[in-house]
Amino acid sequence: MFGWHGRLLRIDLTRGETSAEDIDPQVVRDYIGGRGLAIRYLYDEVDPTVDPLSPENKLIFATGPLTGTTAPTGNRYMVVTKSPLTGALAHSNSGGDFPTWMKRAGFDMIIFEGRAAQPVYVWINEDEVQIRSAEHIWGKDVPQTTDLLLAETSPEAKVACIGPAGEHLALMAAIMNDKHRAAARSGVGAVMGSKNLKAVVAFGRKNPAFFDDAGMREMSVNLSKEVGVDIKKGSNLRIYGTAYVPQVTNTLGILPTRNFQTGVFEGVDQIDGVALKEKYLVTHKPCWRCPISCGRLTSVDDEKYAGKGEGPEYETIASLGSACALDNLAALTKANYLCNELGLDTISTGLTIAAAMEMYEKGIIPEATIGMPLRFGDGDAVIEMVRRMAYREGFGDQLADGSFRLAEKYGHPEMSVTARKQELPGYDPRGSQGMGLNYATSNKGASHMEGDVAYEEVFGVPLKIDPLTTDGKSELVARFQDAFALIDSGGICVFYAVRYVFSREMMIWPVRLAELLNLTTGAAYTPEEALRAAERVYNLERLFLIKAGSGGEHDTLSPRLLNEPLPEGPGKGKVVELEKMLPGYYLARGWDERGIPTPEKLAELGLAA
Amino acid sequence: MRVSVKLIATYRQLLPPGTKGGCIQVEVAPGSNVAQIISRFGVPLDDSSVIVLNGLTVPLETPLSDGDTVSAFSAIAGGCGCSRTELLSSQRC
C-alpha cells in the first residue's frame, strides 16, 4: 500500500495483550483514514448503548494518509470513542509531533480495549510494543508524566497522556500530547482514565512510500510557497496566533461574555492577541511541518500567576476569559497553563465555571456549597475551580460533570450553553446563524472543529457571507460538515485546509485535497468521490448517534440560544432561528423529518444493512 | 460628520503611528460610503479583507451616518515557508 500502512495495533488492556492486524484496503479507501476509519471500526465493534466509562467502550487513536507526509500541516490525529460528556460520539483532533511519530511507528490506528487492572502505559517502538506499569506516574501532571516517560523510553519518542483530570474521570478531561497539544473535547481523557491507561509513547522510522513521490514533493513545495506569499501580505495567525480573534468576534457581537448573557465584552482589549504579544509571547511554536505556525510559546513572570507554556488560544480566551468576564490576562493565561498541566479541555472547563458563576451571582448556588465566592471576573476563583475540577475536589466534583448536568441539578437548564450536553465554542450562534445549525446537528455536540461555517460567516474564508441570515445555511452547513470529515480523515489541519486545498466553487470543493490524497495513496479519488467518502463517514457517525439515543430529537440548542435574544451589538434582538434551517438541512442530507438517513441515502453511500 | 475606523490585528499598522487601541475617529464628507473611508487607510477592498459596518455585513457602497463604526481585518490565514528549525532558531519570521 502507499500512504497507508494498512495495519492497526490492537491493545487489549484487560488481558495485557497486543496484536497487529491488517486493514482491508477497500475499507481504507472507502473511509480514507483518521476519523473515518476509526468510526468504521467503532461502529462495528462497540455497542452504541454502552457505558462510555466501562471496559466495553473502546478508545481509538487514528492517523490519516497525509499524517507524517510532506503535505503542509500533515500532523494531525483523531481520538474516537463514545463520549462520557455527550453520550454520543467523540472525535477529538490534535496536532503537534505525536501523531507523526505514531504513524512512523508503523500503524495507521491503535485500538485500546478493556481495562487494565492497574495503571499502565504503552510503549510502541515500531514492532516492539510493551504494556508497562504506570503506578509510579499515576497522579503526576502532564509535563511531569511526559518528562518521566521520555527518560525511561527514548528521548526521541513522543508522548500522549492524561493528567489528574483524566484519572479522576472529569467529563471534560483531555488527552494531551507533546505537553501542550490537546485532543481536548468530549471527555476522551476520561475514557482513557477509565481504562487505567496513563500514556502512550511512540517512536519509529517507518514511513509509507508515496504513490507518486516526485509529484507529492513538488505539490508540497508549491503549496508551502503559496503560504509563503501570503505571509508577505501579513498573516494574523502567524503574528498573533488565534488570539487575534476576540477583536473580530467582539466586533460582530458574538464573543461569549458572562456565560453567553451577551456577545460584547468590555475588557476585550486586555485579553486579545495584541496584549498577549506585547506582554507574554516568547516565540512561535508550530506543529510538525506547519508553515502557518499559529502556536504560541508564552511566559508569565507576574509573581502571583507565574508560569510558562503554550497559549492561550482563542477558544481559551473566550471560555476562561470573556465567558467568565475575566479581563486579567495573567490570571487567564495561568488558568490555561493549569488546564494543560492537569489535562482539561479549556472550552468545557471555562464554560462550566461561567455557568456556575451565573448561578452563584443569581443566588441559585449558595456560597456554602461552593466553599468560596465565585463572581464573574474573579481570576483567582477561576484558577481554583480549574484545580478542583481536575481532582473532583469539593464543589469541583459537580463542575467536573459539565455545565449541562450542573444546570439541570439546580433547575436552570438555560444557564448551560450546550448542544448535546457539550459546551459551545466561542461563536455566539445568535449572531452566527449557520454556526447555530452546525452546533445543533454536529455529531460530536457543539464544536468548532466540525462543520465550522464561521470560516465564512466570521472570517470571510473562502468567501464572506452574512452571519445573521439563515438563507442558504442548511446546504452550506451540510457541505462544511462533510468537508471537515474529509479533512479529519485525511490527517491535515483545518486552518490550512479550508483556505488552501479547497476551491471556492460549489460551497468549497476539495480539488487539491483529493489530489494530495491521490499522490500519497494512489486511490485516484475524484473530488466528488472524496466528498462522498466524507459523507459516508458523517452518515455512519449519525447511525451510531441514533443507536446511542442521541439522534434527531437532540438536534437542538440550549434554551438561552433559542429564546433569549442578544441584548446588544450587531445581532441585537436575534435568537437562533433553528426551525427555519433544520428541515432544509435534513433535506440536503437526504434524511427524513426525524433526522434519520433514508434507506435510499444509505444505499447510495454503501451503508445499507 | 464623524465616524470611527477600527482596524484589527495586522491591519492596525495601517493606522497613523501612535493610534491607540486600533481605532481612530475621522471626519468624513456627507454622502461618503464604506469603501471610500476604508480605502483611505490602504485596506484592500477585495476578498482578502473582511469589512463590516457597525459589525454588519453590508455592500461597500453603503453610505455612512454620523457615529458609525467601520471595522476591517485580513482574511488571509497564511504563514511563511520556513522550516520548524528555522522558526525556532531565528526571529526572522
Image: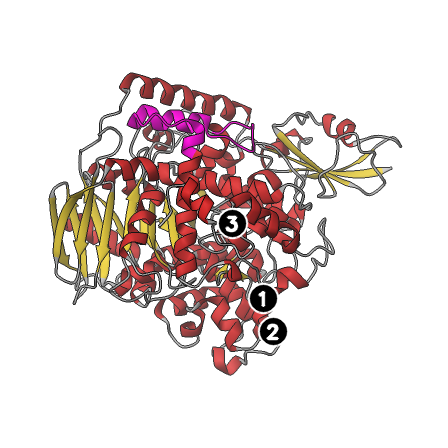
Which chain does the residue under circle 1 lie in? A
Above or below A412: residue A511: above
* Residue A466 percent across, percent down from the top left: 67, 40
Q: Earlier in the sequence, mark 3 or mark 2?
A: 2
Name which residue type carries label 1. Answer: Phe
Between A388 and A605, the one lying in front of the other is: A605
**SS class, disc 3:** loop
| Residue positioned 58% across, 73% down in the render | A412
Q: Nearer the viewer, mark 1 or mark 3?
A: 3
Name which residue type carries label 3. Answer: Trp
| Residue positioned 21% across, 48% down in the render | A201
Between A8 and A422, the one lying in front of the other is: A8
Q: Which mark is residue A361?
A: 2
**SS class, disc 1:** loop
Q: For the N terminus of chain A, which image quadrant? A: top left
Cα–Cα span, label 1 and label 3: 43 Å
**Label 2 CA crowd tier, 10 Å (few <14, some 14–19, many 20+):** some
Cα–Cα span, label 3 and label 2: 43 Å
Q: Which residues are magenta?
A: A502-530
Which chain does the residue under circle 2 lie in? A
Return the residue found at the far right: B30
Name which residue type carries label 2. Answer: Glu
Question: Is mark 2 in CB contact (under 8 Å) with mark 1?
Answer: yes
Q: Which mark is residue A376?
A: 1
Q: Which mark is residue A591?
A: 3
- Residue A283 visible in rendering: no
**Label 3 CA crowd tier, 10 Å (few <14, some 14–19, many 20+):** many
Q: Earlier in the sequence, mark 1 or mark 3?
A: 1
**SS class, disc 2:** helix
Tell me whether marks 3 and 2 sit on the same chain: yes
